[in-house]
Image (spheres, rainbow, N blue to C red):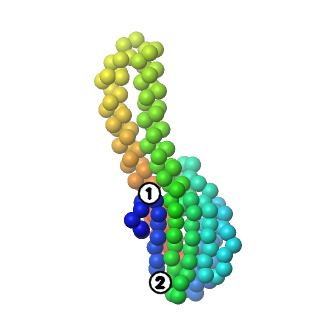
């Protein structure tokens, strides 16, 4: 993987003919609902459908894919833009919901300022920690799926 957390790049030696490896990758990305653009026997590009839920296929964390065969090496490049958007959503949404709940308690519930003053800060910290851990889990899951797919395609 490259230095950027939002890019994936991995090269592995081929153990099968290159056309077979490309066909396997193309089939897997088709199954994950990627828009696979026409390529040749040395590679292809695909555009991902996006990730709208953590329950979706982990490959959908990639927003664009490029598979290339050079000599006896298979290289997979991926931009993890859909994963980045999902991580941002998982971090921001719970915090935003807490702010709205705090405003509700503060203005419409008698003695709601006690909730805002005593409970909200620790709850906000917990939600931020949850968002961070969930985002890291999604990242690990997507990168692992790409690794396993590349390893499967080359054998």
Q: Is residue 129 left or right of residue 21?
A: left
In the image, residue 53 sits, relative to residue 127, either above or below, namely: below
Residue 41 x/y as whole percent: 64, 82
Q: How many marks?
A: 2
Badge 2: how crowded within 10 Å, few (<14), some, or many (20+)? some
Q: In the picture, residue 24 is in which quadrant?
A: bottom right
Q: Is residue 149 left or right of residue 128?
A: right
Q: Which label sits on residue 91?
A: none
Residue 59 x/y as whole percent: 54, 61
Q: Residue at x 62, y 74 (%)?
A: 44
Circles 2 and 1 in contact, beta carbons < 8 Å: no
- Quadrant (top left, top right, bottom left, bottom right) of the N terminus: bottom left
Residue 4 x/y as whole percent: 42, 62
In the image, residue 38 sits, relative to residue 155, either above or below, namely: above
Q: Residue at x 57, y 63 (%)?
A: 64
Dot 2 corresponds to which residue? 13
Element assignment for label 2: strand
Residue 82 x/y as whole percent: 54, 54
Element assignment for label 1: helix
Q: Extreme front residue here?
A: 3
In the image, residue 9 sits, relative to residue 105, either above or below, namely: below
Q: Extreme top residue here?
A: 110
Q: Which label sits on residue 139?
A: 1
Q: Nearer the viewer, residue 87 or 152?
A: 87
Q: Nearer the viewer, residue 44 or 149?
A: 44
Q: CA distance from mark 2 to mark 1?
A: 25 Å
Residue 100 appears anywhere in the view = yes
Q: Is residue 137 left or right of residue 75?
A: left
């Amino acid at each position: 993987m490259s230095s950027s957390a939002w890019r994936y790049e991995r090269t592995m030696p081929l153990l099968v003919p290159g056309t077979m490896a490309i066909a396997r990758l193309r089939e897997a990305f088709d199954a994950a609902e990627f828009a696979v653009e026409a390529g040749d026997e040395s590679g292809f590009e695909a555009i991902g459908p996006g990730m709208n839920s953590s329950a979706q296929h982990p490959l959908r964390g990639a927003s664009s894919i490029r598979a290339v065969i050079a000599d006896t090496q298979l290289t997979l490049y991926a931009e993890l833009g859909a994963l980045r958007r999902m991580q941002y959503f998982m971090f921001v949404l719970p915090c935003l919901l807490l702010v709205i709940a705090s405003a509700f308690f503060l203005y419409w519930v008698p003695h709601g300022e006690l909730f805002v003053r005593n409970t909200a800060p620790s709850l906000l910290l917990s939600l931020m920690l949850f968002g961070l851990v969930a985002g890291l889990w999604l990242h690990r899951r997507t990168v692992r799926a790409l690794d396993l797919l590349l390893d499967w395609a080359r054998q």
